[in-house]
Image (cartoon, coloured by chain):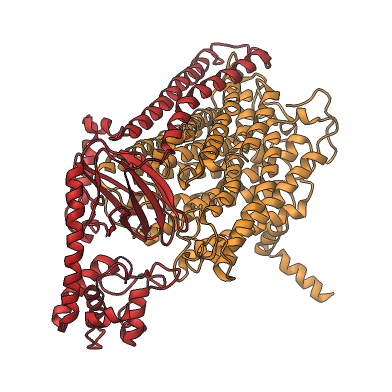
Amino acid sequence: MVADAETVQKLRHPVLAFAARWLFTTNHKEIGSLYLWLSFTLFFIAGGMAMFMRLELFEPGIQFIDPLYYNQILTLHGLVMVFGVVMPAFVGLANWMIPLMIGAPDMALPRLNNFSFWILPFAFAMLLSTLFMEGGAPNFGWTFYAPLSTTYGPPSTDFFILGVHMMGISSIMGAINIIVTIVNLRAPGMKYMQMPLFVWTWFITAFLLIMVMPVLAGVVTMMLTDRHFGTSFFQAAGGGDPVLFQHIFWFFGHPEVYILILPGFGIASQIIPTFARKKLFGYHSMVYATIAIAALSFVVWGHHMFTTGMPLFAQMFIMYATMLIAVPTGVKVFNWVATMWGGSMTFETPMLFAIGFVMMFTIGGFSGVMLALVPADIQYHDTYFVVAHFHYVLYPGAIFGTMAAVYYWLPKWCGHMYDERLGKIHFWAATIAVNLTFFPMHFTGLAGMPRRIPDYSLQFTDFNMMSSIGSWLLGLTQIFFLYIVIKTIRGGAKATDQVWEGAEGLEWTIPSPAPLHTFETPPVITDGHK
Amino acid sequence: MTSCPGRPKLGLMTLLLWGVPQLSLAAKMDMRPGVTEMSVRIQQIHQMGLWVCTVIGIIVFGAMFYTMFAHRRSRNQTPATFSESALVEFIWTLIPILILVGMAIPTTNALRDIEDNDNSDMTVLITASQWKWHYQYLDSGISYYSNIATPQEQINNTEPKGEHYLLEVDYPLVLPSNKKVRFLVTADDVIHSWWVPDFAVKQDAIPGFINEAWARIPVTGTFRGQCAELCGLDHAYMPIVVEVRPAEEFDAWIEDQRIAAELAGEAAVAARAKTWAMDELLPIGQEVFFKHCATCHERDGMGQGAKYPALAGSAIATGEIVDHLDRVMNGKADTEMQAWAPQLSDLEIAAIITFERNTWGNDTGDIIQPITVYEAR
């Protein structure tokens, strides 16, 4: 009994108690916050890498980073941004908001939820630790094409493979949890076609995750056996096929890019009706368009591979399928505009970020349509035009979507209103910086600058300088965002339960800040919340 | 080009001059039409895509800005209540489909022509390896390597950068004008991509595969490109230069290359016959080492970490000559250390090994003769 009392005493130590609370928590709100803070931390690490690369790219010549190290941070920037920033940010939002939006007391599988989160800090600590290993970090780009990543990869590639496995396990468990929660824990009376769009887009995203993360696990396992167990899946000398790697990778990779954007669509579909004070236009077509985009994402992987020598017929099929994606995507954009049309709009920070999301994501969509045209893609492929394209869909797309969500729901999470003036400054500074960074990349790409190079010929200098200055400004605006978030958590005007005048949905019926346990008695849905 | 930012100061000046309108900047903002019929067609397809997107963008963003202005709360107190319209949804599904079909037709026609590799007048086999190109004229048996020619001093900013910084090579690919040239593209080690924007030819070089592409170049001149697929350490330093000459000049060039190859053979025989002294081999060895080996092993022989080992005091460079010869000539499997026997002459290999064994504190005193290399082949 004495020993037990001692243990209890130890656990009462504030540091231990704090650690135990966050390590063992199964509460969806706490796990959601953990995901968001992890994402935010990694955002600064991977963003710092990008700013470091832009420092080297400010001028031709090698000034700060030698090519070997450049390739390493290039690779880690991509991997961490995709798997460590955008995905955990969306999972964090899902954890916080899905139970609140469907009237569930928690996620369906709380222990699994805890496990899926706590894998991630270790996976990313391991991945980042490769920077300090002998032979350096992985240096083959986030797409890790074989054989550069297999037989030619540095020894740390094995840590990368294990890290990808861990992230995959985490994602699959998280996705299962979301699907099970949505299927089983909706408040009595809430039909599927009454679920809020954020829930719907995450529901579809979770299916995409379950379908493609095992493919990613497969391809890194094949890499592992090629590296160490004498197989030749991707080695021509042993009868294997380096192009097979790209087929498998992009069969994962293309649905993956929709995983990175669909929850953003859901966020915009929540925020725009709130601040237009008008119901979302075309709820049903929004759901069907999302399903169509998800389905098409499985038949377009080859558009990343038009220069690998694909047969003519395959190029044509994939080109048409890729162009077709523009149709449901267009429907979504038109529906958002129609939602705004005739509304009574105000432009608080979440609305600004949501509108910025719609516009700049659309710019990324436009360059996507251009990239689908195979003859033109021959000139665009592997240039900065592609870099501009995917950064437009990811930064002002996925990241702005996340920021819109944070400003929108932060008052609900912590019970304080953020400082509206600072939020607006953040939005405008980030919008200017993001365009200054990424818009000139269209021009450098069209002028013929290949991507993934630490040094370039002289005619690209002007636009690269613009991009570099933009990227440093962009970094500063996000430090400002961190300040705004911390300031809001620590204090500020008291938020009402409703928070936003035009907001509808179950999450606005609970108190602000949201108590640790909500909807222990499920609400009954009669008229249907959307 | 407005300036040559060889030094940070010049770069900052460019920055300060941004306020001044720069015509050269505008010219750099679009895809080049290139010089071949196909590159011009491709640029037109690009223009079509760009204009379609621009017009749609103006309409959609115009509607958004209009509604943000007209349907603000200060102007529109009571929001409308509509939220469904099957007709409108149908229209804005159908119109994009029609636009896309309109774009797909010329694109498909161009694609079919791009893939038509038949009836070529000559064939060049392009083999990529880290970080150089090998060109082989299959019709005349001539072959050679093409390496970057930009001096390391320019890359390290100790010398001002030249006009064609990073886009210059020692031996360019020479092609005849007005002939359909077929390119067969492959690689020895990892994936590379052969890209010359002015011909609109970008073809991945994949080990174990031979991909096809073609170009008919109606003009003469010098055209520059780069490797487009990340291929490791020196991906940025793998330029492509193509010199297009009139057909008869091209034929004369081919003949010159044949004679040069014979002379090189004779020179190699003479080099083998001679016994070389240390101070003759060292300068040759240093020059070849700086050109080919220093990118990984560094000029001071210190290497770059575990991946690119130091040669100063290394077991191979100070150990048995046989092992050293084997490593240089045959490389190390599955690493960037490639086989140099096919790329360099007996004299060059002998000079490199002599240099490595007697520099940076390595003092074996060994002198390797070209005949030794010849016999090891």
Q: Residue at x 63, y 41 (%)?
A: A298
Quadrant location, the N terminus of chain A: bottom right
Location of residue B148 (image quadrant) = bottom left
Quadrant location, the C terminus of chain A: top right
Q: Residue at x 81, y 30 (%)?
A: A190
- Give the colour of chain A: orange
Closest to the observer: B193 or A141?
A: B193
Q: Position of residue A257 (x, y in %)?
A: 57, 42
Q: Position of residue B210 (x, y in %)?
A: 44, 53
Q: Residue at x 51, y 42 (%)?
A: A311
Location of residue A198 (image quadrant) = top right
The vertical placement of A10 against A87, above or below, is below
Q: Position of residue A253 (x, y in %)?
A: 57, 47
The vertical placement of A364 against B304, above or below, is above
Residue B216 as seen in the image, left or right of residue A363: left
One can see residue A390 in this view: yes
Closest to the observer: A70 or B271?
A: B271
- Give the colour of chain B: red
Closest to the observer: B250 or A24?
A: B250
Q: Position of residue B38 (x, y in %)?
A: 35, 33
- The image shows a total of numbered marks equal to 0
Closest to the observer: B265 or A24?
A: B265
One can see residue B30 in this view: no
